Amino acid sequence: MKRILTVMMVVCALAIGSVFAEDGMKKSLYERLGKKEAITAVVDEFLKNVVGDDRINKFFADTVKDQKQVAKLRNNLIDQICEATGGPCKYKGKNMEKAHKGMNISDADFGALVEDLVKALDKFNVPAAEKNELLGALASLKGDIVGK
């Protein structure tokens, strides 16, 4: 159960990159996303999407019964995205392969989670470049998550 929660963290988190700003200085993905405030808003929307998604919400049924677990998940997601995108936060969760061992997450489950993330990013009008960076990172983690 906790392993699928880690999937969410990684889905949101593992995109690192930068682009040149108009002044020629590099900006991290963290800055381009709007820093911690914007990441928090996306994570909150993403969690709502996942909990409401009948395709995958069964993985989170126990977590949503415990507000402490919900808060822990939320904070871990925020920290992981923050750190992975070049921000000042530190994520202390498990690596993806260990976290998902024995869960038998399917391609369809993984795809549903990605769709829920895209909905959250779209709600906040995250630009295509930044959205694609996040989704590209997610695609690279699929092998550590699906079928483990």
Image (cartoon, helix red, strand yellow):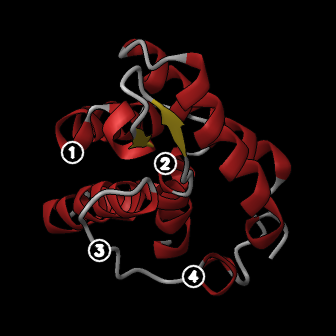
Q: Earlier in the sequence, mark 1 or mark 4?
A: 1
| C-beta proximity under 8 Å, tags 3 and 2 | no
Task: Answer above or below: position of 14 versus 124.
Answer: below
| C-beta proximity under 8 Å, tags 4 and 2 | no
Q: Is residue 106 left or right of residue 66?
A: right
Mark 3 packing: few (<14 Cα in 10 Å), some, or many (20+)? some
| C-beta proximity under 8 Å, tags 4 and 3 | no
Which residue has dot 4 on it? 95
Which residue has dot 3 on it? 90
Spatial distance from mark 4 to mark 2, Cα to Cα?
Answer: 14 Å
Task: Answer above or below: position of 73 versus 111.
Answer: below
Q: Secondary structure at mark 2?
A: helix
Amino acid on which disc 3 is placed: Lys
Q: Residue at x 27, y 32 (%)?
A: 34
Which residue has dot 1 on it? 36
Front position among marks 4 and 3: 3
Mark 1 packing: few (<14 Cα in 10 Å), some, or many (20+)? some
